[in-house]
Amino acid sequence: MAFINHKTKEIQAKIVYYGPGMGGKTTNLEYIHRNFRHRIDSEMVNIRTHGDRTIFFDFLPLEVGKVKGFNIRVQLYTVPGQVMYDATRRLVLKGADGVVFVADSMESRREKNLISLKNLQENLTSYKKSIFKVPLVLQYNKRDLKDVPILPVQIMEKELNSRLKVPSFEASALAGLNVVATLKAIISKTVSSLGDALKS
Ligand SMILES: Nc1nc2c(ncn2[C@@H]2O[C@H](COP(=O)(O)OP(=O)(O)O)[C@@H](O)[C@H]2O)c(=O)[nH]1
Ligand SMILES: [Mg+2]
């Protein structure tokens, strides 16, 4: 559950970018940081974990405004992708209010996407959360690639999203295609789920 400050009337929500290593999570956040600098009130914090990067920074989305008199502040995080960093990954996932799963469209990463999605499910389960209930969107990244084979979107939908049935976006984090659409979708899902939680 998000951090609620009753004094300042502020809710701090945590959104985590998850997915296989090298899929484009950090590139998503770098694009957001570059293009929304005026709305970001902290410098990008960049923690190196032996070559991989776990990044987080505060983000204050305008569209969200208030929910029940509370200002919503969103923090975006990425996790390290490599299998060996599962402990770090699980720690970053802790308390996540929303998750973006960044899948790699490269054919050669097909299996890696499946393994990572399964790992997300297991790590959510370890926090007694269900992948079917957590606010989640999928991003099929690297659609811009021309020199290497990429998977048709229909196949990615079938393999990754046939049971989840969450919003999905074809994207290029490198070119900035649908990076913001992905972000808006997860913010909207996260905020409405927080709104529901506040009601109950
Ligand atoms: N062609 C292409 N390359 C990308 C895209 N997104 C990320 N990359 C590249 O993929 C590599 C891994 O990206 P990174 O964001 O560090 O992946 P992460 O491990 O998921 O954080 C880098 O060389 C990026 O430049 C994309 O949309 N298109
Ligand atoms: Mg990264």
Image (spheres, rainbow, N blue to C red):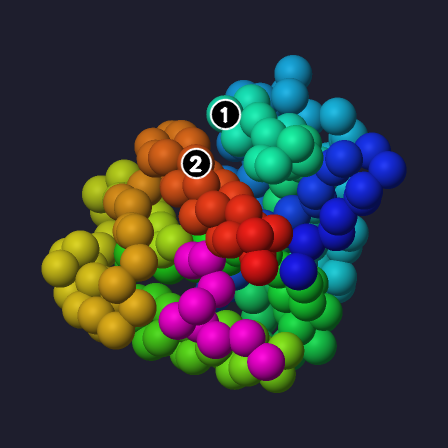
Q: Residue at x 48, y 64 (%)?
A: 134
Q: Quadrant of residue 35?
A: top right
Q: Is residue 150 left or right of residue 22?
A: left
Instruction: Name the residue located 46 percent from the left edge and 57 percent from the top edge.
Output: 135
Q: Amino acid at mark 1?
A: Glu
Instruction: Describe the element under mark 1 as helix, strand or loop.
Output: loop
First along the sequence among labels 2 and 1: 1
Contact check, label 2 and label 1, Cβ < 8 Å: yes
Q: Is residue 24 left or right of residue 41?
A: left
Prevailing secondary structure of the magenta residues: loop
Foreground pick, 151 / 183: 183
Q: Identity of the amino acid at label 2?
A: Lys
Q: Quadrant of the C terminus?
A: bottom right
Alpha carbon distance from label 2 to label 1: 9 Å
**Which residue position holds label 2?**
184
Q: Position of residue 16 (x, y in %)?
A: 58, 55
Q: Residue at x 80, y 43 (%)?
A: 5
Numbered disc in front, either 2 or 1:
1
- Mark 1 neighbour density, 10 Å: few (under 14) some (14–19) many (20 or more): few
The residue beneath circle 1 is 63
Question: Does residue 152 appear to the left or right of 90 in the view shown?
Answer: left
Q: Residues within 10 Å of mark 2 (few under 14, many from 20)?
A: some
